[in-house]
Image (tube, helix red, strand yellow):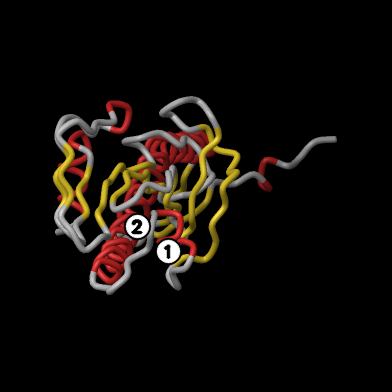
Amino acid sequence: MFFSHSLIKPIQYEGLDGMEHGFTLSELIISMAVLGLISALCLPQVFNEVESIKKEAVLKESIALLNSIIVTESQKDEPAANSQELFTKNANITECRWDLDVINPNDGTDTNGCRLLTGAWVLDVNGHEQFDSVQLDWNGMAPPNELGKDRLAVAFNWSEQDYDDPTWSNENSGFMGSTQLRSGEIKPASMHRDWYERLLR
């Protein structure tokens, strides 16, 4: 089987001089290859940028919601006795689970937590009285589940009294030395301070 030469014609277009010009097959292949290369180089960056914007937005909204929970609780006549009670009874929490299948980077065990209305999880809720330190995970159970990547470490005080413990520290979460928290205050881990402050802008 063969094709007549007259059937294989280049794509025609009319130039400024009024004459018809055409693209050869090789020119079209090269153009498509260049476009494919550009897409391969740019698309991952675009996806990463979109993911980063989404993460920042969820964390910013979650911090605002968490702050509202803490401030409101600190103004009650009888604040929650511990952090688990604080989250379990709050209307801004959709669920709490104490057996989440997520590796806790602090000690390699499963952790626990509560999901905010934003979809983010407040993880590693230890049930402390007056104050607690937690990990705010913007994408919940999805990986990488690592501090500094999808997790932001914060400490907070929901009691009526200011909190000051010169001996408390949590090296794995970035809280070192004295922990001073005013009533209704949220404070980021030192290694997340710049990230936290950027979210508040």
Residue 37 location, quadrant: top left
* Quadrant in the picture for the N terminus: top right
Crowd band around label 2 with a 10 angstrom C-alpha radius: few (<14), some (14–19), many (20+) = few
Question: What residue do we see at 23% from left, 33% from top?
Answer: 168
> Which SS class for mark 1?
loop
> Hey, what amino acid is under mark 1?
Thr
Asked if the residue at tag 1 contacts the one at tag 2, i.e. Cβ–Cβ closer than 8 Å, the answer is no
> Which SS class for mark 2?
loop
* Front disc: 2 or 1: 1
Say which of 11 and 182 sits in front. Answer: 182
> Hey, what amino acid is under mark 2?
Gly
- Percent position (x, y) of residue 59? 33, 55
Q: How many numbered marks does the figure carry?
A: 2
- Percent position (x, y) of residue 116? 44, 62
Crowd band around label 1 with a 10 angstrom C-alpha radius: few (<14), some (14–19), many (20+) = some
Say which of 59 and 74 sits in front. Answer: 74
Q: Is 155 placed above or below 87 here?
A: above
- Percent position (x, y) of residue 126? 42, 44
- Percent position (x, y) of residue 88? 49, 62
Question: What residue do we see at 67% from left, 40% from top?
Answer: 5
* Residue that label 2 marks: 15
Give the alpha-carbon distance from disc 2 to disc 1, as whole Å: 56 Å
* Residue that label 1 marks: 118
